[in-house]
Amino acid sequence: MKVIICGAGQVGWQIARHLANERNDVTVVDNNADLVRRATDSLDVQGVAGFASYPDVLERAGARDADMIIAATHSDEVNMVTCQVAHSVFDVPRKIARLRAQSYLDVIYSDIYRRDHMPIEVVISPEREVAAAAMKRLASPSAFDSEFFLDGKLQLLGISLDENCPVVNTPLRQLSDLFSTLRAMVVGVRRDGSLFAPDPGDQLFVGDEIYIMTNVEDSKRALEIFGKTSSKQERVILIGGGNVGRMVAQEIEAMPGKSIRAKMIEKDRKVAELSAETLERTIVLNGDGLDAGLLREAGIERADAVLSVTDDDKTNILTAVRAKSQGCQLAIALINDPTLVPLMGPLGIDAHINPRGTTVSSILRHIRHGRVRDVYSLGDAEAEIIEAEVLSTSPIAGQELRDIDFPEGVLLGGLLRDGEVLSPTGSMRVVEGDVIALFALAQDVGEVERLLQVSIDYF
């Protein structure tokens, strides 16, 4: 498939890496020649330096025979015009745009994206994706990552193991014997900065970061087995009142039962006033989230969680650390720079939100073809959770799991059949119509798609 990616920033680069690794014809366009050079030097892609919305630039990028264009520059307007030019001049079949401004995302204006107006098949909102990720972190406060699959019946949990974990130094195969009724499976382990798919004989150690896939009904028990306790989040403090902070506050206010009380701290007075006007029950304080006195005024020592979601990574880290030092139970920070993530543990920050990862996941799930229903990117695009329906033409259809030649970096985390989630066993036979959720290291995604008989393509 021939894909043009407009914008060679963090998101564009990661999408280019995913698609190039799967042998697609990828061209990256950016008006910053240095970013284009970085992409062409490190990835198997072509590059064009220029403004993505210019027809002559798109022509040089090969738009006349492109199958898809992904507009992910920093400008909403450039992304929208790029899609319009791609449609009107070059008749590109599929167009995806990343848009941030809330006015463009308002449902009452959604007709703007009709084919006879401004034809954009898929609109991605990073702020909405990040807000949704924040709510998932709040729902699973003991996990550093959380996502749902198989119609919401299977949950992925990222857990950091500490001295309270009772099953460290225990081979994974023995966990099945010790907890025979537990519907959960360890699918990934990050140790010393490296992520791998564990074997049954592997042990878990203090300091490991693990990914488990569990039936949602067993998620609380699974957390307890790995040394984590579940607690309700009733008092939340948000640091940052921008788009992300406001969206998280709106999500909290929309929760049934009004079970969470939220306060917001925003440094910019105009932004704080806008948030106060927009929100109904959230208390908005104008001031610096690093101000210890202001944090005390907000009741940080009684807060169940603090979410630092400003547009500055260092501010998010420092405010999260200060909140923890003043008694807050849970600290979650928004982190754009992946090189800062290893600092989270030593600094005592419980979880982080990766805007790039959430946006990449969102884009990937919209460009997978065939029966792939969902894609979730883990870590710094180190692995993916792929949810897909088994086709009759798939090489795995009709086979027992023990006979399927999955790559070493691939593990089956769950299977949905007739509305019921089944835990994988070696004797289980995969049949047409089953929906499976797979953990796959980045280098093995191509082989997984071959086994599923699906490919990256346009609809």
Image (cartoon, rainbow, N blue to C red):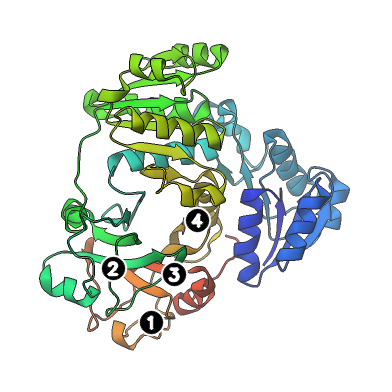
Mark 2–mark 4 distance (CA, rounded to whole Å): 31 Å
Check disc 2 and report its element: helix, strand or loop: loop
Q: Is residue 434 visible?
A: no
Quadrant occupied by the N terminus: bottom right
| Residue 13, percent from left and from top | 66, 55
Indicate which disc, 3 or 1, sits on the residue closer to the N terminus.
1
Classify 144 as above or below 369: above
Mark 3–mark 1 distance (CA, rounded to whole Å): 16 Å
User: Is 18 in front, or is 409?
Assistant: 409
Indicate which disc, 3 or 2, sits on the residue closer to the N terminus.
2
| Residue 342, percent from left and from top | 47, 52
Mark 4–mark 3 distance (CA, rounded to whole Å): 15 Å
Q: Is residue 171 left or right of residue 111?
A: left
Q: Within 10 Å of the Cα at label 3, are there few (<14), some (14-19), or many (20+) other Cα atoms?
A: many
What amino acid type should be assigned to the residue bearing mark 2?
Leu
Proximity of marks 4 and 3: CB atoms separated by less than 8 Å? no
Q: Which mark is residue 396?
A: 1
Proximity of marks 3 and 1: CB atoms separated by less than 8 Å? no
Mark 3–mark 2 distance (CA, rounded to whole Å): 19 Å
Q: Residue 113: name its quadrant.
A: top right
What amino acid type should be assigned to the residue bearing mark 1?
Ile
**For discs 3 and 2, the disc positioned in front in the rendered view:** 2
Check disc 4 and report its element: helix, strand or loop: helix
What amino acid type should be assigned to the residue bearing mark 3?
Ala
| Residue 414, percent from left and from top | 29, 67
Q: Which residue is mark 4?
A: 365
Mark 1–mark 2 distance (CA, rounded to whole Å): 30 Å
Q: Which residue is mark 2?
A: 204
What amino acid type should be assigned to the residue bearing mark 4?
Arg
Quadrant occupied by the C terminus: bottom right
Q: Which residue is mark 3?
A: 440
